Image (cartoon, rainbow, N blue to C red):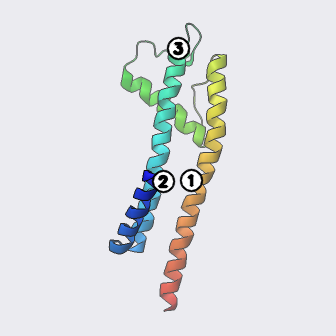
Amino acid sequence: LRVAKLQRELSLLANRFLSTYVFMVMRIVAALMVMLSINHIIACCWYAVGSRAAQNSWIQNFNLQEAGIFESYIVSLHWSLTQFTPSTNNVAPANDLERLFAVFVILLAMGCFSSFVGSITATVNALRSIQATKIKQ
């Protein structure tokens, strides 16, 4: 409830002081930040799921047992991002728990990515509409 109220207050403040174009760009950047946050959480969970396996896991298949936290995080984040977009990845689930998690993430990603694309489309269309109105005046 507080987040919704904060978002509404920030929107009112932005409408008062910022141009429409800057406001639209800020909405797209905010949507990107939300997507990155979701992917960060999924990447951390993906690494945790792989770490729990005693033997056969994506971490062992990718030889990351002795890797540093940065390399492990980057591989996990790359896997997470590829679940949201039509891109390729070498990392694959190696056991049933990882496969179940991957299926859950794919289902979540379909909804999130569709919503993200729809939001950007609506923002761009609103900006075009505003510019067309300005041109007619």
> At label 3, which amino acid type do we have?
Arg
Tag 2 residue: 31
Give above or below for 61 relative to 14. above
User: Which of marks 1 and 3 precedes in the sequence?
Assistant: 3
Indicate the secondary structure of the residue bearing disc 3: helix
> At label 2, which amino acid type do we have?
Ala
Q: Residue furthest front?
A: 1
* 8, 66: nearer the viewer: 8
User: Which of marks 1 and 2 precedes in the sequence?
Assistant: 2
- Badge 2 local density, few (<14 within 10 Å), some, or many (20+)? some
Tag 1 residue: 116
Asked where in the image residue 24 lies, by quadrant, the reply is: bottom left
Q: Which mark is residue 10?
A: none
Q: Is residue 93 visible?
A: no
Dot 2 and dot 1 residues touching (CB under 8 Å):
yes
Q: Percent position (x, y) of residue 82?
A: 57, 37
Indicate the secondary structure of the residue bearing disc 1: helix
* 41, 61: nearer the viewer: 41
Dot 3 and dot 1 residues touching (CB under 8 Å):
no
- Badge 1 local density, few (<14 within 10 Å), some, or many (20+)? some
Q: Percent position (x, y) of residue 114?
A: 63, 51
Measured Cα–Cα span from mark 3 to mark 2: 32 Å
- Badge 3 local density, few (<14 within 10 Å), some, or many (20+)? few
> At label 1, which amino acid type do we have?
Phe
Q: How many marks?
A: 3
User: Which of marks 2 and 3 precedes in the sequence?
Assistant: 2
Measured Cα–Cα span from mark 3 to mark 1: 32 Å
Q: Measuring 57% from the left and 70% from the top, which residue is drawn there?
A: 125
Q: Residue furthest top?
A: 55
Tag 3 residue: 52
